[in-house]
Image (cartoon, rainbow, N blue to C red):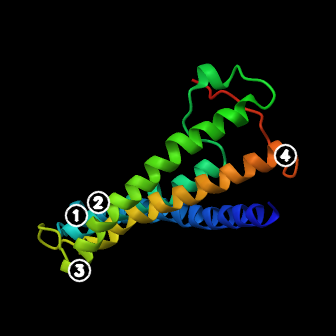
């Protein structure tokens, strides 16, 4: 199990690095948005490319940032059940959700989005808007993000199994979000 645990920690490392890239895309999007607004309304110059790059960066933010959210255990869950569990109960619920919901859905979405990306990449599909951008970089975020979520889900399964075996320490404390 130590090889798998090292693999899981390597996946964690990758997710953290891509999470930093995702955080940078938020800043880049905000700066581009502010610059675009200034140029559009201040200088009366416009380009659809500036709007589209914001969408592309947002796609990168969501798809590259989601795995680190899973790693940090900050994802969506059913609080009414999860918050009442004691001991190893939350770990078993996590394992069930990861194995029967997250992994199958993420792997299916990776499989389904890959051909769409390849079609756009091979055809060099462009936006229909004047001054628009090539579309494949944004479409790449789908199979890449779903694949990274699958990897992080696999890492979370490994860490929880190791935790149950006593070979890995993790914080199982759950704090219900403030509403």
**Who comes first in sequence, dot 1 or dot 3?**
1
Disc 2: which residue: 37
Q: Please give the name of the residue rendered at 61% of the width and 62% of the height, measured from the top-left corner.
A: 15
Secondary element at tag 2: helix
**Depth order, front residue of 160/126:** 160
Q: Which mark is residue 40?
A: 1
Q: How many residues crowd mark 4 within 10 Å: few (<14), some (14–19), many (20+)?
A: few
For mark 4, what is the residue? 165
| Residue 131, horizontal then vertical, whole percent | 16, 74
168 lies left or right of 45: right
Residue 122 tag number: 3
Q: CA distance from mark 3 to mark 4?
A: 47 Å
Q: What's the CA distance linking mark 2 and mark 3?
A: 33 Å
Q: Are marks 3 and 4 in contact (CB under 8 Å)?
A: no
- As drawn, the label of residue 99 is none
Q: Earlier in the sequence, mark 3 or mark 4?
A: 3
The CA span between labels 2 and 1 is 5 Å
């Amino acid at each position: 199990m130590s090889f798998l645990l090292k693999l899981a920690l390597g996946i964690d490392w990758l997710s953290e690095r891509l999470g930093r890239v995702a955080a940078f895309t938020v800043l880049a999007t905000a700066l581009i948005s502010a610059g675009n607004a200034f140029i559009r309304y201040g200088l009366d110059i416009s380009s659809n490319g500036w709007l589209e790059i914001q969408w592309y960066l947002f796609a990168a933010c969501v798809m590259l940032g989601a795995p680190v959210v899973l790693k940090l255990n900050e994802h969506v869950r059913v609080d009414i059940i999860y918050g009442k569990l004691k001991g190893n109960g939350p770990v078993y619920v996590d394992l069930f959700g990861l194995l029967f919901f997250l992994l199958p859905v993420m792997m299916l979405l990776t499989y389904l989005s890959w051909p769409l990306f390849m079609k756009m990449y091979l055809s060099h599909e462009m936006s229909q808007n004047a001054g628009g951008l090539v579309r494949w970089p944004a479409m790449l975020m789908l199979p890449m993000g779903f694949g990274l979520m699958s990897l992080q889900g696999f890492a979370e399964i490994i860490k929880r199994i190791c935790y149950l075996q006593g070979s890995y320490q993790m914080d199982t404390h759950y704090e219900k979000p403030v509403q």
